[in-house]
Image: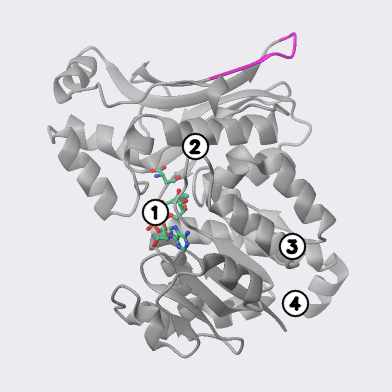
């Protein structure tokens, strides 16, 4: 039976949810997925850090209400986050990077990824920074170090659109995409349509664990811009950077404007899109669009996301699913570890073990 040791860098909503899933489902995963997970290191800006080569009990981690610096009370613990020390020194097979996304620099997550690869550790991440701002460098570095780098949750949370486009739609000749790629802003638009104020709707999204640490990224389109860059580069073969993507958000939309649109048979949605034209030129944008109610994306509600891929062989292919949420995003990390496991384990060995 394979047991992967993991270090959790960032212990907020997503990595805490992953620890909860480990506590609840590790035995099931060993039976059904062929591996289990053992937490050997955790680092968090507020809680501190802990390294335990024999493992840290996931139930204890998730059941304990730690105060600021509270990891210092654990064996092998410190009140200091020591994130790079944990990445380098905790004996993890896989580093799970789920710290804040910094849309401008991608740090410290990019440094966490580099340090993990240098230490011979794979990385799975939901952090959009490294994937939007340094994917080419990090993928090459991971390959040179003989380790894996997976990031399904960077776009549409647990809804698997990156690997879907790269694998299941390989050969379909994808020429573009357009979609609702941010759960927080879609949730906010829906709540405002009930008459709730903008600030109150954003607060609800934060309480639900959907929003970025700075929700400006959600409502001004910066989060979608990162996701458009990721998808265009991963799926359309582009080499986009965020500054090349026109970007506007939803903060100018008022409940009255939303009501007026509804009365006219339309609905505002924040849409991220990219397309390659006949000359091969890629154009990409993030903007609020007023869609007819009959449009397939108009009925997407709450923190649900949806994306339509335009393809040469299939026409439009639309995928919808959760775009945010602690558990939903923790699942993306699990799916990344499944991908690493399947790449590392030849099919014949997997079938023999099943
Ligand atoms: N919440 C969601 O629905 C989704 C989140 N993501 C991304 O996943 C990542 C984590 O999201 P959440 O858990 O919701 O955020 P969060 O804000 O709940 O947790 C982030 C944690 O990272 C810690 N942190 C920040 N800088 C650190 C550092 N240098 N060293 C150690 N710890 C550090 C913070 O203390 C915090 O506890 C973010 O990058 C986010 O953009 C991606 C898809 C969906
Ligand atoms: N804040 C983001 C989280 C997922 O990427 C969103 O709301 O979509």
Q: CA distance from mark 3 to mark 2?
A: 24 Å
Is residue 301 visible to the viewer in this orientation of the structure? Answer: no
Q: Nearer the viewer, residue 262 or 89?
A: 89
* Residue receiving disc 2: 104
**Mark number displayed over residue 103:** none
* Sequence-first tag of 4 and 3: 3
Indicate the quadrant where residue 252 lies.
top left
Q: Is residue 232 above or below residue 112?
A: above
Q: CA distance from mark 1 to mark 2?
A: 23 Å
**Mark number displayed over residue 118:** 3
* Residue receiving disc 1: 325
**Mark number displayed over residue 354:** 4
Please state which of the two labelled residues, at mark 4 or mark 3, is closer to the viewer.
Answer: 3
Indicate the quadrant where residue 192 lies.
top left
* Sequence-first tag of 1 and 2: 2
* Sequence-first tag of 1 and 3: 3
Ligand 1, seen in the image, is in the quarter at bottom left
Residue 96 covered by magenta stretch: no
Q: CA distance from mark 2 to mark 4?
A: 45 Å
Instruction: Identify the element where label 3 is drawn.
Output: helix
Task: Estimate the x, y position of residue 45 in percent, counting from the top left.
Answer: 41, 64
Instruction: Tell me which residue sits at (63%, 29%) in the image.
Output: 232
Report the quarter where the N terminus lies.
bottom right
Q: CA distance from mark 1 to mark 4?
A: 31 Å
């Amino acid at each position: 039976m394979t047991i992967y040791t993991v270090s959790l860098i960032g212990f907020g909503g997503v990595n805490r949810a992953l620890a909860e899933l480990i506590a609840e489902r590790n035995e099931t995963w060993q039976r059904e997925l062929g591996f289990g997970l053992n937490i050997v290191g955790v680092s968090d800006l507020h809680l501190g850090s802990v390294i335990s080569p024999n493992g840290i009990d996931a139930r204890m981690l998730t059941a304990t209400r730690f105060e600021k610096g509270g990891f210092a009370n654990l064996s092998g613990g410190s009140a200091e986050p020591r994130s790079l020390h944990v990445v380098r020194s905790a004996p993890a097979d896989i580093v799970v990077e789920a710290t804040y996304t910094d849309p401008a620099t991608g740090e410290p997550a990019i440094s966490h990824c580099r340090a993990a690869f240098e230490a011979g550790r794979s990385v799975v991440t939901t952090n959009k920074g490294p994937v939007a701002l340094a994917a080419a460098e990090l993928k090459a570095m991971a390959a040179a170090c003989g380790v894996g780098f997976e990031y399904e949750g960077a776009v549409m949370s647990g809804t698997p659109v990156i690997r879907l486009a790269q694998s299941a739609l390989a050969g379909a000749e994808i020429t573009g995409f357009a979609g609702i790629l941010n759960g927080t802003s879609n949730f906010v638009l829906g709540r405002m349509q009930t008459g709730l104020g903008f600030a109150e709707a954003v607060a609800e999204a934060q309480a639900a664990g959907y929003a970025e640490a700075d929700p400006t990224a959600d409502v001004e389109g910066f989060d979608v811009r990162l996701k458009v860059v990721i998808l265009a580069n991963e799926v359309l073969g582009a080499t986009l950077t965020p500054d090349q993507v026109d970007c506007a958000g939803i903060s100018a939309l008022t409940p009255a404007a939303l009501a007026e649109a509804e009365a006219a048979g339309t609905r505002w949605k924040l849409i991220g899109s990219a397309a390659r034209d006949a000359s091969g030129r890629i154009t990409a944008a993030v903007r609020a669009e007023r869609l007819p109610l009959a449009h397939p994306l108009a009925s997407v509600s709450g923190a649900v996301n949806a994306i339509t891929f335009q393809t040469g062989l299939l026409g439009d292919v639309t995928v919808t699913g959760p775009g945010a949420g602690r558990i939903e995003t923790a699942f993306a990390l699990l799916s990344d570890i499944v991908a690493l496991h399947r790449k590392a384990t030849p099919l014949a060995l997997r079938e023999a073990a099943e």
